[in-house]
Image (cartoon, helix red, strand yellow):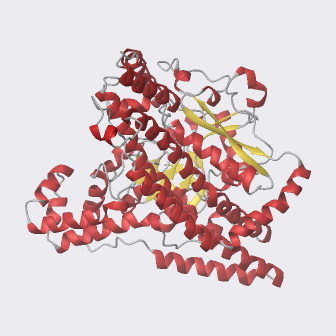
Amino acid sequence: MATQKSFPSPFEIKTPPGAEGWEEMYPYYLLFSDDRREVEEKFWFCDTMHWTFPLYPFDAITAENALAALGQYNSRVYMVPPALGIDLRVLNGYVYISPLPVANSEEVQERIKDFSERAGFYYQNWDELYAKWKEKVTAEIENLKKMEIPHLPEKEDLETVKNGVGISTGFRLLEAYNRLLESMARIWQYHFEFLNLGYVAHLDFTTFMKNAFPDIQDQTIAQMVAGIDIILFQPDKELKKLSKLAIELNLQKIFLSRQKTGEIIEELNGSENGKRWLDALEAIKDPWFYFNSGTGFYHTPRSWIDDLSVPFSAIGGYIKKLEQAEEIERPQEEIKKKAKRLENGYYSLLKQDVDKEAFTAKLALAKKVYPYVEEHNFYVEHWHHTIFWNKMREIGKIFVENQFFGDEEDVFYLNRYEISQTLYELYSCWAIGSIPRGPKYWSERIEKRKKIIKALQNYQPVPALGTPPDVITEPFTIMLWGIVSEKIQGWLEDQTAGQETGRLLKGHAASPGIVEGKARLILSVEELDELKDGEIMVCPITTPSWTPIFSKIAAIVSNAGGMMSHAAIVCREYGIPSVVGTGFATHLIKTGQQIRVDGNKGVVEIL
């Protein structure tokens, strides 16, 4: 059977039953449309690494801000020679993206000079500029945290008159919402200030190594920069400290009793040692518990600061291992030694001095930029976004207080433009004293949208659309998503053969090691408690906040991800064998099946 050469057209994909009308939830420009069909009949892939589930209408703001910021740094700021930005569409609630190349070879040459000057400045001043970046981002987070979301009073305080304030609470509410949108946009501007350059540096080192050693694996190259100590691992370190403290204070039985989180806290409050432990917990919550249990791109799931069930479950697991005299620390020194051995080995194989110099310089730059590739994730998707989503819940509460919605979470079923309109109507009617249309208007629509989202959650999006290009040039697409010609060809073969017959899945060899064991399908953070010691976790994608459960599992298999995805990096840093970017793992593998994960070759076999 000949392999198909293209994926379905976006215009051929049907709406799942029960999701009719999904298009009205999103801005018009995010939808595929007949009036620009000519430019939309191209290659798109589903970004289930960041947006694993269908987008709530408001949550689309993360996709919009992320892709716009990424694109501007590629195409307008640093002038990455072969690549523009990444186009974005929503289809059946899922995010599809398409990398845009610089088509004209002469333009590529013209951009090289700009890129060398602009990127070169950042590379040469990386430490100073990165320190400045941390100051900017931390200031933005603190400003967001302090931002007041004013509730509408029956009458303004007398001080408004006596102090000649000149503006009302209603106006300040509109202002607060606009500032929230600005904060989300600004943090994503900061997010990509360095990240594009980080991937370019790694791609440059990878290209050099593959030219020098054609048979070298991507994983081997990635291992040469492993063994880092970054802020993203700090929340897990704090949990380990709290676990050891619980044993020192003789509190371990409380955590191993399988009580609910609230019951554990109540019991801890009943003793002096328990209160000492809770004080230690409070001391580290800010900022380390601003750690989202998902990717941070959705208002749900919640972060540790809002829901202690994930960290408390992890603490119980660490206590159990400590009592059995098992090691719970990340094998950082061992990973660093392996990286150094690889570095020395490949350096010695290079014959020309010019190649040795290039190897040393390119590896040094890759190591320098590597921490940012992961650390930004904590500042933006976790710390900032946790506060942002909770500020939006404050907006939701105000709508509930004024009978517009029945629940504060209903605010996320409106997109950002609809919220702006609805908030203005609320302000206007409050100011005038008139009866708003919003309560009746939104009641039926929100209920309809809840049913649509539920229907879309039960739908499996196709991994790609349209005709693939001859070559992918955009650095994010290659390094982060792992979308390369071989991966696309594998999807086409799976599509031709039919997914149901597969016993062998191919992905990226993200972290070395070979493991056989029982599979455990994990589709959401709520299912993490089901993991048993020694099982292999099969999931759409892992997130950094899942690292506390890594001490339980034997290996990880994911649908999405490339060599420099968060999942791949974290697995290497924790020494967990992993294959990422399989495309269909959660579709083909069932809980309880015996599987073999080859993290050396990037292959998963259903036994």
Quadrant location, the N terminus: top right
Viewer can see residue 195 = yes
Q: Residue 162 location, x and y as percent? A: 31, 41
Q: Is residue 281 above or below residue 431?
A: below
Location of residue 128 (image quadrant): bottom right
Q: Residue 32 location, x and y as percent? A: 66, 26
Closest to the observer: 262 or 125?
Answer: 125
Q: Residue 390 location, x and y as percent? A: 37, 44
Q: Is residue 118 above or below residue 53?
A: below
Q: Is residue 214 above or below residue 588?
A: below
Closest to the observer: 78 or 370?
Answer: 78
Location of residue 222 (image quadrant): bottom right
Q: Residue 367 location, x and y as percent? A: 62, 73
Question: Is residue 291 shown left or right of residue 335?
Answer: left
Q: Residue at x 65, y 34 (%)?
A: 495
Viewer can see residue 552 = no
Question: Is residue 48 shown left or right of residue 543?
Answer: right
